[in-house]
Image (cartoon, rainbow, N blue to C red):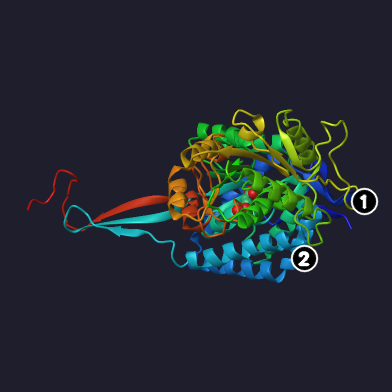
Amino acid sequence: MTRQIVSVVGGKDAAGTDTYESTNPARITEVVARVGLADAQAFADACRTAKEAQREWAKVPAPVRGRVIASIGRLVEANAEALAHLVTQEIGKPYAEALGEVREIVDTCDFFLGEGRRLYGQTVPSEMPDKKLFTFRNPVGVAAVITAGNFPVAVPSWYLVPALLCGNAVVWKPAEYAAASAHAMYQLFAAAGLPDGVLNIVFADGVQTFRGLELALEEGTVHKVGFTGSSEVGRKIGELTGRHLQAACLELGGKNPMVIMPDADLDLAVEGALFSGFGTAGQRCTSLGTVIVHESVHDEFVERFAQAVQNAEIGDPEQDVLAGPLLDQKFADRYEEYLTWIQPHHRVVSGNVGKIANESPRRDFTGDGGLYYHPVVVDGVKPTDQLFLEETFGPIVGVTTFETLDEAIELANLPGYGLSSSIYTTDARHAWKFREGISAGMVSVNNSTSGAEAHLPFGGNGKSGNGSRQSGIWVLDQFTRWQAMNWDHSGHLQKAQMDVVDI
Ligand code: UN1
């Protein structure tokens, strides 16, 4: 049954001016939802509605807001399977992963419900007697949250939950191709007792969203932008918000390296590379980009890795598979472009790269016309190759070699992203050296590049973001502004730096 969904602003459905069809990538003729799309003015109006609602929401004591977050967590948990099935149907994420993704919303709520009873400020000593200094966290106001569809519910919750807990209102613009999943999550959040207008969901295409955001920033109705998506769009959002003297929270792409030392446990490394590279069909921002393997273990690693990839189950995401189809037609088209980056000097050790052989690389594994591709492993990648330097959002992993750890670290940093990274080694000294040298926001030792836990700081540097961090206590700095207060009870004017007590 096709769902009909529209934006919800101030608790009311808002009809769209255009329609988008969100389809099931495992059966591309199946329309999951018909989505009414808003225009720029409607986006800006939603921000105004949010601003009004935020005034009252900020007055609700933080522990009470924490109780609402607790209810959201319970509601999501009670509806986890239905939501996960919808995610699988709409974006083709294997069901076990989709359930894990829903679990991540609950984890996020579990963390922040208690933060409602902390949200600590500080008492700070003054340089003068009879004077007290304090700090407070104030909400920023309205957060405009623009999210991708590869994690259609968990990653949005990383913004929504802390933003709401801190006393902000939110206008959330999810990816159109994941609209039904986002709408279902919105309904669970709304049912937990959020006052109308505190959380709003607006469906719009990229152009209208950008214009709407521009209008809202000019009107002063957006005070923080959270964006997860490509580095290219992130740069535009960063420029726009920068013009309004705001720093957006940007979570962008990655070209995440995995270094394999000669002393690594190769079984573990193969398993890690398989999941990092091809879980979620390689469509996580934390997915493995390039394996940087020591030349002494290169041949053995590549042979075992290629074998593991050949044996991996790709197919119906409702089944127990490593990967399902790509997210959406747009992503499949883009992925086929990335395949053209494969050069004659490369050695394709797994998968089918039909473009080169003049045939489609798509593989109809289930016979339902899904957007499936066989995972590709490309050996002999050079540091000057596009395949080495740029993100390839999809099931393709490059392999290159190194001689010294210093060289491996240099190679790992070379593409200029800085989201996730991994090293496989049994020597702790190598792991510590890698941690210090890698410019990534996240480092794994003997583990996948993907699969960060929901209470550690998540985020990247360079082309992966502007240093902002989500999750855990660190995200509080995105959704609150510090306010410093001094209170003098000496009964006379004490001047800082001028009336300092001598001893
Ligand atoms: C993303 O792809 O945008 O660390 C986020 C991970 C997941 C989140 C990925 N928890 O792989």
Q: Quadrant of residue 335?
A: top right
State whether residue 147 appears in this view.
no
Q: Is residue 282 above or below residue 381?
A: below
The image shows a total of numbered marks equal to 2
Q: Secondary structure at mark 1?
A: loop
**Does mark 1 have its CB less than 8 Å from ligand 1?**
no
Residue 488 appears left or right of 427: left
Instruction: Return the residue nearer the eye: 66 or 399.
Output: 399
Mark 2–mark 1 Cα distance, whole angstroms, equals 25 Å
Q: Is residue 331 above or below residue 155?
A: above
| Residue 407, image x, y percentages | 49, 37
Let me know if residue 480 appears in the view: yes
* Marks 2 and 1 close (CB-CB < 8 Å): no
10 Å crowding of disc 2: few (<14), some (14-19), many (20+): some
Q: Which mark is residue 69?
A: none
| First of labels 2, 1 by sequence position | 2
Amino acid type, label 2: Ala
Q: Secondary structure at mark 2?
A: helix
Residue drawn at x 59%, y 31% as measured from the top left: 383
x, y percent for residue 114:
50, 68
- Residue 14: where, in percent of width, then height? 75, 49
Which residue is the extreme one toward the left? Answer: 503
The location of residue 471, given as percent across then percent down, is 53, 55
Q: Nearer the viewer, residue 256 or 125?
A: 256
- The answer to whether residue 47 is left or right of residue 1 is left
Mark 2, mark 1: which one is toward the viewer? 1
Relative to the observer, which residue lies in front, 169 or 393? 393
Q: Is residue 497 left or right of residue 90?
A: left
Q: Quadrant of the N terminus?
A: bottom right
User: Disc 1 residue type?
Assistant: Gly
Mark 2, residue position: 82
- Check residue 367 in the rendering and tell me which mark sits there, or answer none: 1
